[in-house]
Image (cartoon, rainbow, N blue to C red):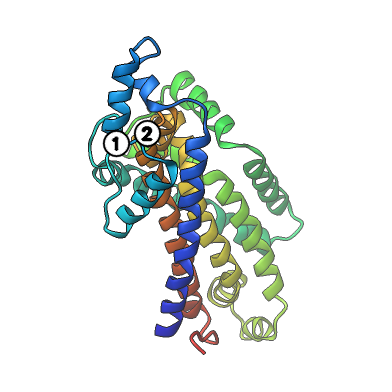
Amino acid sequence: MKNYLIKRILLTIPVVLGVVSLVFWLIHLIPGNPVDLMLGETASAADKLSLYRQLGLDKPLFSQYTDFLSGIATGNLGYSLHSNKPVLDIIIQRLPATIELSIAALIAAVGISFPLGLASAMRQDSWVDNGSMLLALLGISMPNFWLGPLLIILFAIQLDWLPVGGRGGFLHLILPAITLGSAMAAILTRMIRSSLIEVSHEEYITAARAKGLSKIAVYVKHALRNALLPVVTILGLQLGALLTGSIITETIFSCPGIGRLTITAINSRDYPLVQGCVLVIALSYVFVNLLTDLVYALIDPRIRYGR
Protein backbone atom coordinates (compact mmCIF):
# COMPACT_ATOMS: atom_id res chain seq x y z
CA MET A 1 0.00 0.00 0.00
CA LYS A 2 2.85 2.37 0.85
CA ASN A 3 4.54 1.82 -2.52
CA TYR A 4 1.23 2.36 -4.29
CA LEU A 5 0.66 5.65 -2.50
CA ILE A 6 4.13 6.93 -3.37
CA LYS A 7 3.72 5.88 -7.00
CA ARG A 8 0.33 7.60 -7.34
CA ILE A 9 1.56 10.81 -5.71
CA LEU A 10 4.53 10.94 -8.06
CA LEU A 11 2.23 10.41 -11.05
CA THR A 12 0.06 13.34 -9.99
CA ILE A 13 2.95 15.81 -10.16
CA PRO A 14 3.14 16.00 -14.01
CA VAL A 15 -0.68 16.11 -14.21
CA VAL A 16 -0.94 19.13 -11.91
CA LEU A 17 2.08 20.77 -13.58
CA GLY A 18 0.50 20.31 -17.00
CA VAL A 19 -2.84 21.79 -15.92
CA VAL A 20 -1.25 24.81 -14.25
CA SER A 21 1.10 25.42 -17.18
CA LEU A 22 -1.74 25.23 -19.69
CA VAL A 23 -3.81 27.72 -17.71
CA PHE A 24 -0.84 30.09 -17.36
CA TRP A 25 -0.28 30.31 -21.11
CA LEU A 26 -3.97 30.40 -22.03
CA ILE A 27 -4.84 33.19 -19.59
CA HIS A 28 -2.05 35.32 -21.06
CA LEU A 29 -3.40 34.73 -24.59
CA ILE A 30 -6.84 36.15 -23.71
CA PRO A 31 -7.29 39.61 -25.26
CA GLY A 32 -7.00 42.49 -22.83
CA ASN A 33 -4.71 43.09 -19.88
CA PRO A 34 -5.17 43.97 -16.20
CA VAL A 35 -3.47 47.36 -16.51
CA ASP A 36 -6.12 48.71 -18.92
CA LEU A 37 -8.87 47.33 -16.67
CA MET A 38 -7.35 48.90 -13.55
CA LEU A 39 -6.41 52.31 -14.94
CA GLY A 40 -8.81 52.60 -17.87
CA GLU A 41 -7.96 53.16 -21.51
CA THR A 42 -7.64 56.91 -20.99
CA ALA A 43 -4.67 56.57 -18.61
CA SER A 44 -1.34 57.95 -19.74
CA ALA A 45 1.36 55.71 -21.16
CA ALA A 46 3.69 56.63 -18.29
CA ASP A 47 1.15 55.51 -15.68
CA LYS A 48 0.54 52.26 -17.54
CA LEU A 49 4.27 51.56 -17.83
CA SER A 50 4.76 52.27 -14.14
CA LEU A 51 1.99 49.84 -13.19
CA TYR A 52 3.35 47.22 -15.59
CA ARG A 53 6.69 47.34 -13.78
CA GLN A 54 5.06 47.36 -10.37
CA LEU A 55 3.04 44.23 -11.17
CA GLY A 56 5.98 42.49 -12.86
CA LEU A 57 4.16 42.25 -16.18
CA ASP A 58 7.04 43.91 -18.03
CA LYS A 59 9.07 40.70 -17.76
CA PRO A 60 9.09 38.17 -20.60
CA LEU A 61 6.32 35.55 -20.33
CA PHE A 62 8.78 32.71 -19.84
CA SER A 63 10.38 34.60 -16.96
CA GLN A 64 6.95 35.11 -15.38
CA TYR A 65 6.26 31.41 -15.87
CA THR A 66 9.46 30.28 -14.13
CA ASP A 67 8.81 32.73 -11.29
CA PHE A 68 5.34 31.25 -10.89
CA LEU A 69 6.64 27.67 -10.79
CA SER A 70 9.37 28.54 -8.30
CA GLY A 71 6.73 30.25 -6.15
CA ILE A 72 4.59 27.10 -6.15
CA ALA A 73 7.59 25.04 -5.05
CA THR A 74 8.02 27.31 -2.01
CA GLY A 75 4.29 27.59 -1.26
CA ASN A 76 4.04 31.14 -2.58
CA LEU A 77 1.24 31.64 -5.12
CA GLY A 78 1.99 35.33 -5.55
CA TYR A 79 -0.15 38.39 -4.95
CA SER A 80 -3.45 39.43 -6.49
CA LEU A 81 -2.96 42.14 -9.10
CA HIS A 82 -6.04 44.03 -7.91
CA SER A 83 -6.18 43.66 -4.12
CA ASN A 84 -2.41 43.19 -3.65
CA LYS A 85 -3.21 40.47 -1.10
CA PRO A 86 -1.54 37.04 -1.05
CA VAL A 87 -3.38 34.69 -3.42
CA LEU A 88 -3.19 31.85 -0.91
CA ASP A 89 -4.92 33.94 1.77
CA ILE A 90 -7.73 34.90 -0.63
CA ILE A 91 -8.26 31.27 -1.64
CA ILE A 92 -8.24 30.03 1.96
CA GLN A 93 -10.87 32.64 2.78
CA ARG A 94 -13.14 31.45 -0.04
CA LEU A 95 -12.45 27.70 0.18
CA PRO A 96 -14.88 26.87 3.06
CA ALA A 97 -17.88 28.07 1.01
CA THR A 98 -16.94 25.76 -1.89
CA ILE A 99 -16.31 22.79 0.40
CA GLU A 100 -19.62 23.43 2.14
CA LEU A 101 -21.49 23.55 -1.17
CA SER A 102 -19.73 20.44 -2.54
CA ILE A 103 -20.52 18.40 0.57
CA ALA A 104 -24.15 19.55 0.48
CA ALA A 105 -24.41 18.63 -3.21
CA LEU A 106 -22.83 15.23 -2.51
CA ILE A 107 -25.28 14.53 0.33
CA ALA A 108 -28.18 15.56 -1.90
CA ALA A 109 -26.97 13.36 -4.77
CA VAL A 110 -26.39 10.30 -2.57
CA GLY A 111 -29.65 10.84 -0.69
CA ILE A 112 -31.58 10.89 -3.97
CA SER A 113 -29.71 8.25 -5.97
CA PHE A 114 -29.40 5.37 -3.51
CA PRO A 115 -33.14 5.04 -2.69
CA LEU A 116 -34.12 5.52 -6.34
CA GLY A 117 -31.49 3.09 -7.65
CA LEU A 118 -32.37 0.48 -5.05
CA ALA A 119 -36.10 0.80 -5.72
CA SER A 120 -35.54 0.55 -9.49
CA ALA A 121 -33.44 -2.60 -9.17
CA MET A 122 -35.93 -4.27 -6.84
CA ARG A 123 -38.89 -3.46 -9.09
CA GLN A 124 -37.61 -3.81 -12.64
CA ASP A 125 -39.90 -2.62 -15.43
CA SER A 126 -42.47 -1.32 -12.94
CA TRP A 127 -43.79 2.24 -12.73
CA VAL A 128 -41.23 2.84 -9.97
CA ASP A 129 -38.40 1.78 -12.27
CA ASN A 130 -39.68 3.78 -15.22
CA GLY A 131 -40.27 6.87 -13.07
CA SER A 132 -36.78 6.68 -11.56
CA MET A 133 -35.16 6.35 -14.96
CA LEU A 134 -37.21 9.29 -16.25
CA LEU A 135 -35.99 11.43 -13.35
CA ALA A 136 -32.42 10.29 -14.03
CA LEU A 137 -32.78 11.24 -17.70
CA LEU A 138 -34.06 14.69 -16.74
CA GLY A 139 -31.21 15.14 -14.25
CA ILE A 140 -28.59 14.39 -16.87
CA SER A 141 -30.28 16.49 -19.56
CA MET A 142 -30.75 19.71 -17.56
CA PRO A 143 -27.58 21.86 -17.38
CA ASN A 144 -26.77 23.82 -14.23
CA PHE A 145 -27.13 27.20 -15.89
CA TRP A 146 -30.73 26.32 -16.81
CA LEU A 147 -31.80 24.37 -13.72
CA GLY A 148 -30.43 26.95 -11.26
CA PRO A 149 -32.47 29.95 -12.52
CA LEU A 150 -35.54 27.68 -12.86
CA LEU A 151 -35.31 26.69 -9.18
CA ILE A 152 -34.80 30.34 -8.19
CA ILE A 153 -37.91 31.43 -10.10
CA LEU A 154 -40.04 28.64 -8.62
CA PHE A 155 -38.91 28.32 -5.00
CA ALA A 156 -37.39 31.74 -4.27
CA ILE A 157 -39.52 34.16 -6.31
CA GLN A 158 -42.89 32.48 -6.90
CA LEU A 159 -43.26 30.46 -3.67
CA ASP A 160 -40.88 32.54 -1.51
CA TRP A 161 -39.77 29.43 0.40
CA LEU A 162 -36.00 29.70 0.03
CA PRO A 163 -33.42 32.51 -0.32
CA VAL A 164 -32.21 33.38 -3.79
CA GLY A 165 -28.52 32.98 -3.05
CA GLY A 166 -25.58 33.98 -0.92
CA ARG A 167 -24.22 32.16 2.10
CA GLY A 168 -25.89 32.26 5.47
CA GLY A 169 -27.14 28.91 6.63
CA PHE A 170 -28.83 25.63 5.73
CA LEU A 171 -31.61 27.23 3.68
CA HIS A 172 -29.07 29.02 1.49
CA LEU A 173 -27.55 25.66 0.53
CA ILE A 174 -30.68 23.85 -0.61
CA LEU A 175 -31.12 25.32 -4.09
CA PRO A 176 -27.42 25.40 -5.10
CA ALA A 177 -26.89 21.89 -3.68
CA ILE A 178 -29.77 20.48 -5.73
CA THR A 179 -28.57 22.35 -8.81
CA LEU A 180 -25.01 21.09 -8.45
CA GLY A 181 -25.90 17.55 -7.38
CA SER A 182 -28.71 16.80 -9.84
CA ALA A 183 -26.49 15.48 -12.63
CA MET A 184 -24.46 13.43 -10.16
CA ALA A 185 -27.65 11.97 -8.65
CA ALA A 186 -28.88 10.98 -12.11
CA ILE A 187 -25.64 9.19 -13.02
CA LEU A 188 -25.44 7.42 -9.66
CA THR A 189 -29.07 6.28 -9.88
CA ARG A 190 -28.50 4.56 -13.21
CA MET A 191 -25.20 3.07 -12.05
CA ILE A 192 -26.65 1.70 -8.79
CA ARG A 193 -29.58 0.17 -10.66
CA SER A 194 -27.44 -1.54 -13.28
CA SER A 195 -24.88 -2.78 -10.72
CA LEU A 196 -27.57 -4.24 -8.46
CA ILE A 197 -29.28 -5.98 -11.38
CA GLU A 198 -25.95 -7.45 -12.47
CA VAL A 199 -25.08 -8.94 -9.07
CA SER A 200 -28.67 -10.07 -8.36
CA HIS A 201 -28.07 -13.18 -10.47
CA GLU A 202 -25.00 -14.31 -8.53
CA GLU A 203 -25.07 -17.56 -6.55
CA TYR A 204 -24.65 -15.90 -3.16
CA ILE A 205 -27.81 -13.86 -3.81
CA THR A 206 -29.69 -17.07 -4.61
CA ALA A 207 -28.36 -18.62 -1.41
CA ALA A 208 -29.45 -15.60 0.62
CA ARG A 209 -32.94 -15.85 -0.81
CA ALA A 210 -33.01 -19.56 -0.05
CA LYS A 211 -32.37 -18.77 3.61
CA GLY A 212 -35.67 -16.96 3.73
CA LEU A 213 -34.35 -13.40 3.86
CA SER A 214 -36.69 -10.69 2.67
CA LYS A 215 -36.07 -9.10 -0.71
CA ILE A 216 -34.96 -5.78 0.75
CA ALA A 217 -32.60 -7.53 3.19
CA VAL A 218 -31.00 -9.47 0.33
CA TYR A 219 -30.41 -6.30 -1.68
CA VAL A 220 -29.25 -4.09 1.18
CA LYS A 221 -27.09 -6.58 3.13
CA HIS A 222 -25.66 -8.68 0.30
CA ALA A 223 -26.14 -7.21 -3.18
CA LEU A 224 -25.48 -3.55 -2.39
CA ARG A 225 -22.01 -4.05 -0.89
CA ASN A 226 -20.78 -6.05 -3.90
CA ALA A 227 -22.36 -3.60 -6.33
CA LEU A 228 -20.62 -0.58 -4.80
CA LEU A 229 -17.25 -0.88 -6.57
CA PRO A 230 -18.29 0.67 -9.91
CA VAL A 231 -20.51 3.10 -8.00
CA VAL A 232 -17.54 4.31 -5.95
CA THR A 233 -15.60 4.88 -9.18
CA ILE A 234 -18.32 7.15 -10.55
CA LEU A 235 -18.81 8.77 -7.15
CA GLY A 236 -15.13 9.69 -6.92
CA LEU A 237 -14.97 11.10 -10.43
CA GLN A 238 -18.19 13.05 -9.97
CA LEU A 239 -17.03 14.42 -6.63
CA GLY A 240 -14.08 15.96 -8.40
CA ALA A 241 -16.43 17.28 -11.05
CA LEU A 242 -18.44 19.04 -8.34
CA LEU A 243 -15.53 21.42 -7.82
CA THR A 244 -15.47 22.43 -11.48
CA GLY A 245 -19.27 22.52 -11.66
CA SER A 246 -19.32 24.85 -8.68
CA ILE A 247 -17.94 27.62 -10.93
CA ILE A 248 -21.30 27.96 -12.70
CA THR A 249 -23.45 27.21 -9.66
CA GLU A 250 -21.65 29.68 -7.40
CA THR A 251 -21.98 32.37 -10.03
CA ILE A 252 -25.74 31.78 -10.38
CA PHE A 253 -26.41 31.78 -6.63
CA SER A 254 -23.76 34.38 -5.68
CA CYS A 255 -21.94 31.94 -3.41
CA PRO A 256 -18.62 33.40 -2.19
CA GLY A 257 -16.53 30.35 -3.10
CA ILE A 258 -13.61 29.37 -5.31
CA GLY A 259 -15.81 29.05 -8.41
CA ARG A 260 -17.12 32.59 -8.28
CA LEU A 261 -13.67 33.84 -7.36
CA THR A 262 -12.25 32.19 -10.49
CA ILE A 263 -14.79 33.90 -12.75
CA THR A 264 -14.09 37.27 -11.12
CA ALA A 265 -10.34 36.77 -11.52
CA ILE A 266 -10.71 35.84 -15.21
CA ASN A 267 -12.86 38.87 -15.95
CA SER A 268 -10.34 41.18 -14.27
CA ARG A 269 -7.33 39.39 -15.85
CA ASP A 270 -5.90 38.74 -12.37
CA TYR A 271 -3.34 36.20 -13.57
CA PRO A 272 -1.91 35.03 -10.22
CA LEU A 273 -5.39 34.59 -8.73
CA VAL A 274 -6.66 32.59 -11.72
CA GLN A 275 -3.60 30.34 -11.59
CA GLY A 276 -3.99 29.85 -7.83
CA CYS A 277 -7.67 28.93 -8.13
CA VAL A 278 -7.02 26.44 -10.93
CA LEU A 279 -4.14 24.92 -8.95
CA VAL A 280 -6.39 24.35 -5.93
CA ILE A 281 -9.15 22.83 -8.09
CA ALA A 282 -6.67 20.55 -9.88
CA LEU A 283 -5.10 19.38 -6.62
CA SER A 284 -8.54 18.71 -5.16
CA TYR A 285 -9.52 16.66 -8.21
CA VAL A 286 -6.33 14.60 -8.02
CA PHE A 287 -6.74 14.06 -4.27
CA VAL A 288 -10.33 12.85 -4.70
CA ASN A 289 -9.26 10.35 -7.39
CA LEU A 290 -6.50 9.05 -5.15
CA LEU A 291 -8.93 8.70 -2.26
CA THR A 292 -11.33 6.82 -4.54
CA ASP A 293 -8.65 4.26 -5.40
CA LEU A 294 -7.92 3.70 -1.72
CA VAL A 295 -11.59 3.13 -0.92
CA TYR A 296 -11.58 0.20 -3.36
CA ALA A 297 -9.56 -1.86 -0.90
CA LEU A 298 -12.06 -1.24 1.87
CA ILE A 299 -15.02 -2.33 -0.26
CA ASP A 300 -13.41 -5.32 -1.98
CA PRO A 301 -10.72 -7.13 0.10
CA ARG A 302 -9.60 -9.03 -3.01
CA ILE A 303 -7.95 -5.89 -4.32
CA ARG A 304 -4.31 -5.52 -3.31
CA TYR A 305 -2.04 -2.64 -4.24
CA GLY A 306 1.66 -2.26 -4.43
CA ARG A 307 2.42 -5.63 -6.01
Front residue of 184/91: it is: 91
The percent position of residue 281, horizontal first and vertical second, equals: 42, 50
Q: Is residue 101 visible?
A: no
**Quadrant in the picture for residue 48:** top left
The percent position of residue 138, horizontal first and vertical second, equals: 66, 41
Dividing the image into 4 quarters, which one contains the N terminus? bottom left
Residue at image location 48% in from the left, 19% down from the top: 158
Front residue of 200/270: it is: 270
* Dot 1 or dot 2, earlier in sequence: 1
Front residue of 17/172: it is: 17
Q: Is residue 78 visible?
A: yes
Residue at image location 70% in from the left, 54% down from the top: 129
What residue is disc 2 on?
270
User: What kind of residue is marked 2?
Assistant: Asp
Element on which disc 1 rests: loop
Q: Is residue 143 left or right of residue 8?
A: right
